[in-house]
Image (spheres, rainbow, N blue to C red):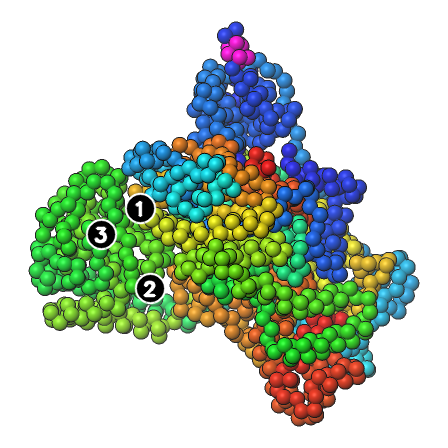
Amino acid sequence: MNPLLTTRRRALRTLGCGFGYLALAGLAAQEKARASINPLAPRVPHLKPRAKRIIFLFMAGGVSQVDSFDHKPRLIQDDGKMMDFADLRSLAKTGKSPQQRVMRPLWNFAQHGESGLWASDLFPEMAKHMDDLCVIRSMHTEGIAHGPATLFLHTGSTTFIRPSMGAWVNYGLGTENENLPGFVSLSPALGNGGPRNYGNAFLPAIYQGTAMGRAGIPATEAAIRNLKPARSPEEARRQFDLLRELNVEQLTQKPGESELEAVINSYELAWRMQTTAPEVLDVGSESPETLALYGVGDKETDNFGRQCLLARRMCEAGVRFVQVNYGDNTNNPAWDQHSNLKKHGEHAKAVDKPVAGLLADLKQRGLLEDTIVWWGGEFGRTPYAEKNGTGRDHNPAGFSVWLAGGGFKPGITFGETDEFGHHAIIDKVHMHDLHATLLHALGLDHEKLTYNYAGRDFRLTDVYGNLVKEVLV
Amino acid sequence: MFPRSTFLPAAALLAFCVSASHAAHVPLTPADLEFFESKVRPLLVERCLDCHSAEKKVKGGLRLDTREGWAKGGDSGPAIVPGDPGKSMLVTAVRYTDRDLQMPEKNKLPDAEIAILEKWVQMGAPDPRLGETATKQQTGLTLEEGRKFWAYAAPKQSPPPPVQDATWPRTGLDHFVLSKIEAAGLQPAPDARAEALVRRLHFNLVGLPPTPEEIDAFSEASQNSPQAALEKAVDQLLASPRFGETWGRRWLDVARFAESSGGGRTLLFKDAWRYRDYVIESFNADVPFDRFIREQLAGDLLPAATPADARRQLTATAFLALGPTNYEEQDKQQLRFDVIDEQLDTLGRAFLGQTIGCARCHDHKFDPIPQRDYYAMAGILASTRTLFDYEENVARWIAAPLPSDGPAEAALRDHEGKVAALQKDLSGAKAELAALSKAVTQEAVKPGLPVAPSELPGIVIDDAQAKLVGEWKHSTFVRSYVGAGYVHDLNAGKGEKTITFTPTLPKADRYEVRLAYAHASGRASNVRVNVLHADGEDTVFVDQTQAPPIDGRFVSLGKYRFEKEGAGYVLISNDDANGFVTVDALQFISESEAAKKDQSADAANPLRADVAQRVKKLEAQLKQLNKEGPVRETAMAVREDDQIADAQIRVRGVEKQRGETVPRGFLRVALTGETKLPSSQSGRRELADWIAAADNPLTARVFVNRVWTWLFGAGLVRTVDNFGTTGELPSHPELLDDLAVQFVAQGWSTKRLVREIVLSRTWQQSVRSESAEDPENRLFTHANRRRLDAEQIRDTLLSVSGQLKLDYGGLNIIQAGEINPNDFSAQNVEYGYVFADTRRSVYTPAFRNKRLELFEVFDFSDINASMGQRNVSTVAPQALFFLNHPFVLEQARAAAERGLGSNGDDAGRISTAFRRTLGRLPTSAELEKCRRFLGPNPTIETWAQFHQTLFACVDFRYLD
């Protein structure tokens, strides 16, 4: 049965009215939203939330699972052999899949911590935190090329124009700090979906992500746009006073207009943001120990370290959804090692310490309990060499992500790929399922988080998605 | 999109003919029964029935709890072909070999259980479980029921209803509105003051504020006869080119107009501006709306009296091509259907107010749109070509050459002939040069002798520095090698060996990539080489049976762009090679270095120098000719596909799950006669005719309602893009019908309709607060207070500051004229774009991945989807924009300079500023506050702050 329909029918029953009324309710609600009620006010979630906020560490381009968290001895055993694999790109293009050469992982695997979870020495610092991680090794998703797969990761659709996950969360939960945006994407790329990856699509614009900085610009320059006052404090004050006076004067001509009051409120909020937001974004007040923990100050890790540190500061200040992007603006984003897989090492170097630092810092501040940290890319990579070369091609059929904190079971793995690490086969978790599960942890039922648009209710998970209870505490 | 992940794809549709009856007649032996009961039944219960039984769920329409259930099968047909596991979808699904068909969804069954099912099917699937499978499907209205729903029934004209206050109405329209107001016991609002009315009129019709002079003239004329003053002003504004710019912009929202594809790999729509201009022109010329529809859907198929008509009509079809297409989708069949989906969704919303897209996967759940109708229309678009090519790694649109007028066309053809001739000469000369170069340089570098990489120009990577995979044999047998020798593949292990060269290039540039190989007998003629460069990946094949043409050592693999120290590589494989594959070295020559090298070769050989000179000359001539000659313009367009065919239903909307073939056609609920489509054409022209027909119940209503919405801020049907059963009912159905019928009867004239509405008394009411009886103003008892939209804000700022440039039409993306849009580096034009022009906002480059910040902040619609009505939000980033954005500061400064340039005292300047910015004089209190702020001797800076404050104040953003 289509769950969307059940929801709809339930809604109709509850309202006891016809279809027309439902559409109308949506319109009236929008009218209201545009007036006095703050649409970003915190809202009561559907369920008892395990987490209040989420940090998504996006590894653009696709990290190789078989070189990081999915340990497959068969790859070492059969290294160099030509074997049959269902290669998705070849199948999509030609309907056939030629034989492929098995390629062993370039990094050595070992078991770590009390949990004994496997991780390779690609991420030596993260490996120290295996007891905190819930590694899902049976991910699969849609889209063989970066654009479609990246859009799918963020919006649940490879093609259609849909709101991003952060916008849905913002819509579902509101923000806890009205002086800050509820959803921030740090240094997002212009390519592979660009603004759609943090866009609101048909949701009201207020729920869209706020981009800070951009891929290719140093994190030190990432800022909320137009936040920096254009004039000296005294001048700005004087000018703002005039604005207030004129607005009050104009409002007295048109009393009781909630819409106009909303504009005036938006100025008051903007005025406050100019002072509060920069404090949150200034990492200067952090101790040298903390900076070092994130690798801030070291050439290789400074940039991503700053981003991770900013993520923690924003979470502390009440931002609901922070996405930290490790990528660039090209068509072959960072982790996209079609050749020269060794280059994974350089990227790992840049993110490993900052991510481990973030985990340690959240933990020591007691924030990890109600903060989800989600690490992963849009897909994984093939266990065989691409075109018999030195790299690996995209693999949406099986890959790994990990989650930490926020009600996810620590120190476990969930699901398995086949013996080569190619296709997920046991306890498969589709990207829709991950979305549903993340929403659940935040207290949102993915089947109830709907928005009526163009005559029907839409959800992040479309008509799909199953909650993966097994990974939650 | 047609989702890929699903449970029941096409595979076993072959088996459709082997149906239930066969299964029913297999007699059960005791052994069969024993096997079923002991092995199969428990397995089905444990693994399958949670999702495929009447008791629980019936996913994919498939039941496995009765024999009838699997025999009849789910949405894609029978699940089991008794006796043939290979053809049974159930077996395919549990084997987990087809990624689109894997069951159980989450976990592959243990091999032993798969074997049980295989054996069971092999045995003929003996199954004692009898019982009916009732299929129940939720659908929307039937076609019959649907035709009774208001939107699908023909609009009826009714006489204007009687009203109590007969003095109030000025037009027929007013009767419809007033009668409802009176019926509710309410009063219409008083007429708006002239000052407010003229401002409202200007913004509504031309999107710009009236000048102080225009305000004065209108106010004065209004004192004598308000209606005559309004009529005059309306006619003037309708005749202004600014009208088409403003109203065209509204249509561009509906047409999801953009100048890049956005999404994954954004591509620049270099020619999209022609469509934008076509729309602006059409509104200015008041092209009948039915023709406007026909041109956009089938302009390429309509007769054209003049080349200008042919150009317009071809350009108009960009409507179908402008979507946010995901050109890099790897499954091109999927891509074709994604495009069709988007087209159907857009044209359904834009013209018909229908959510046709809902019928892609199943019959529409609410509206009378069966899935068949969707695929009937899909067949028309599948017989239409929107993509240039169905094979390319990254697809692209069609850039159709545009015809020109008589002499211009003759000049173009003449020019094209000359270019072709010159190109022929040039390629001849180039071949000669290549031959000579070979001779010369072989002589020059003494063939047969090894050469060190350092002696060669450019970046040279020897095979020794490359990554070898598989067994390659080192050799120095053919002596003309680079570096320490070369390698060959022993002519064995085809497909198992590769060599990858990963260059470290010192600078980003275009490089000619050359491969050195050892030429001898027995070489392969088809050596595959992959080049991954900054703009994508190319495959070239090298014929090693031929001597290397360059210096006897190298062959050129082409010129490619590489980033500095980027991820590029060159990979040579022996896959499918039909002989020995040899690899010696790779050379990367930047374009500038190549030029240097040619010079040295010429010095060594005068004959070569001659030919080189000739090549250069011809190239220069060609360049000159191309520069001087007329340019054949191109437009984004669609055309008929080579293959005209009906489409198959895609079961559950999954592209690969093909169902029944449906004859091409339209939405039957809105169809009066028979549909007869030509077998030699797509049927697009007939589709356009059906939509634009006078008796289509939806089209005129939907458009009339749009016009009403654009003028009132709320529609008679407020769900402007949804006239289906989930949309809102019209507040004034008789009025909507009356307007629609008249609109058609009077030639589908938009200007006439606008004029009629604006001259109504209803439109001229003043703004007042909402009443408790009609909180949403559905009765139009007063004018809605409206927000300036993003374009109006920007255009007004520029107009107040005196910076607005009123250039009409034409390309407005800097650099777009110089780039090849099919070169992927074209996306850098978008990513790096600096929005600097001060033309009207309708001309601001409409990139999908990089928007003008002001547009983003002020609710400019998402240009990825057809949007008849934008969201409206009031958020802090808008306030921050007015407080701190450089654009606002610049315009405030320019406005201050403009104000100081005029004579008069500070009070006069304040008043002028108010009139220009807010369309009214300051109140005495406002004047006083502003004077106090400015102080006795205000600097330009203080004036700028004052102007900025006017931009930021509440009244600026609202229209009374």
Q: How far across and how far down the image is residue B871, in percent? A: 66, 59
Name the residue carrying label 3.
B465
Q: Residue at x 50, y 17 (%)?
A: B125
Left or right, residue A106 beside residue B846: left
- Tag 1: amino acid: Thr
Q: What number is the disc on residue B508?
A: 2
Badge 2 marks a residue whose secondary structure is: loop
Residues at marks 1 and 3, CA–CA distance in whole angstroms: 14 Å
Q: Chain of mark 2?
A: B
Left or right, residue B608 beside residue A143: left
The answer to whether dots 1 and 3 both sit on one chain is no
Residues at marks 3 and 2, CA–CA distance in whole angstroms: 22 Å
Quadrant of res A90:
top left
Q: How far across and how far down the image is residue A332, in percent? A: 40, 53
- What span is colored magenta in the figure? B32-38
Q: Residue at x 44, y 44 (%)?
A: A127
Q: What number is the disc on residue A390?
A: 1
Q: Chain of mark 3?
A: B
Q: Is residue B383 visible?
A: no
Q: Residue at x 59, y 19 (%)?
A: B66
